[in-house]
Image: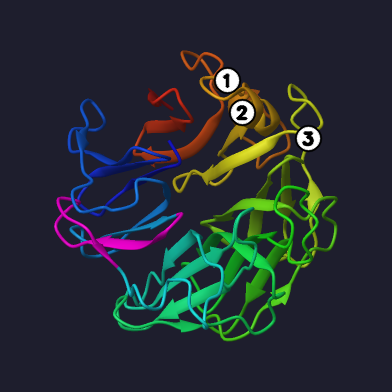
Amino acid sequence: MDDIVKAADGTLYAGTYSLGMFKSTDLGQSWTFSSYNLENPYIMLIAAHPTEPKTVFVTTNGGVYVSYDNGLTWERVAKDFFSDSELLPGISHFHGIAFDPKDPNRIYVGGGGDQYSPSGVGISISEDGGKSWKPANVGFEIDVHVSKIVVDKKNPSIIYATTQGATNFNEKTGTGYGIFKSADYGSTWKKINSGLETVETNTLALDPSDSNTLYLGTDDDGIYKSSDGGASWKKLSISQLPKKYGVGDILVDPRNSNVIYVATVDYFRLFTVRGFVGDHGVYVSRDSGNSWQPFNEGLGHAGAFALELDDDILYVGTRGGGIYWRKV
C-alpha cells in the first residue's frame, strides 16, 4: 500500500503498487475497487483536491491520472506532455504530486526515470487545474527524480521537493540526490542538503504550527529534522531501530505538533525477500522527535509505507500486508 489519503468529504483512498486504487466511505471498515479506466495500476502517490472532494489525482509509474467522480472513472492527464517526448525524455515514473492549498488550480508533479529509463525531469506545474503543464526545473540537477512534493500551507510560495538521483538508480550515485526548496512557487529551486549524511531523500513533513520545522525521511538513513526551514539538518535517533533504516512516510499531528508518527521499513529485506516482510513498522514521538516509542500493537512485522490520520484514527499502509488502523 503505497499511499493513503483522506479527501475533503471524508472518503479514504488507498493506492497500491500493482492492484490500482481502492476507496472507503466508512472509515476503512470496507473497501471497494476504484480503478475503472485506470490504465496503470502501479500507484505512487495520491492528491485529493482541497475543496472539490470528487476530484482526485494519482501518479503512477507510467503517467498521471485524474478522477472527477470520486474514483469511479479515470482519465490520463496531458498524455502528450507526460510521456516519452523530446520535452520529457525517458519518462516512466511519476511520483511526487501536490496542490497549492490556497489556489488548487496550481498543481505540482514530480517525475523521473527508473533503472530502465534513467533520465529524470524534476518538477512540472499546472496553473489551470491540470489542463496544461510546463516544466519548472531551474536549479534542479539534470538527473533528478522527485519522490515527494510538499507545499507550505501558510505560505504556498514555499515548496519542498525530496529527490533521488536517477543517473544510476541501482547504485544510487546520481548527482541529483537531496532536498530542494523553492520560495517563488516553483520558478526556481535551491538544494538544501547541509547536515545530511545521506542525500537519498524519500519523504517530508512540515510542522503545521511552525513551517520552519521540517521532518525528512530517507531511504536508508532514518529521519532528520530542520528547525530553520531546511537551512540545516540534524539526524534524529530512534534507539529501537538499527542505524540504517528506511522511512516511507512521516505525519505530524495537526492537533498537537509535538506528536509525530513515522512509518519505517527495512528496504533491503523488502526488495530482496519480497512479500509481507520488512519489519520496523510505526514509531511515535510525543516530544517533537527527541524520543520515540514503538506504535506497532497489532501490526505484526509489516514494514510501513503510508500514514493518514482521521481525527483519532491512524491508518497505516503496508507493502503486501494491507491496511491497518488504530486509535491514537
Q: Label 1 is placed on what type of residue?
A: Val
Residue 237 disc label:
3
Residue 138 tag number: none
Q: Is residue 13 visible?
A: yes
Which amino acid does the dot numbered 3 rest on?
Answer: Ser
Give the mark nearer the N terminus: 2 vs 3. 3
Q: Quarter-wise, where is residue 58 in the image?
A: bottom left
Q: Is residue 272 above or below residue 150?
A: above
Which span of residues is magenta-colored?
61-76
Question: Toward the viewer: 96 or 288?
Answer: 96
| Along the line of sight, the residue nearer the viewer: 92 or 299 | 92
Give me the C-alpha separation between circle 2 and circle 1.
6 Å
Question: Which corner quadrant holds the N terminus?
Answer: top left
Q: Which mark is residue 277?
A: 1
Tell me the element at label 3.
Answer: loop
Residue 128 is one of the magenta-drawn residues: no
**Is residue 302 placed above or below 243 in the rendered structure?**
above
Q: Residue at x 48, y 39 (%)?
A: 306
Measuring 17% from the left and 53% from the top, which residue is drawn there? 70
Query: Residue tagged by mark 2?
Result: 270
For numbered disc 2, what is the local secondary structure?
helix
Disc 2 to disc 1: CB gap under 8 Å: yes
Determine contact: label 2, label 3, CB under 8 Å: no
Looking at the image, which residue is at 60% across and 65% down? 161
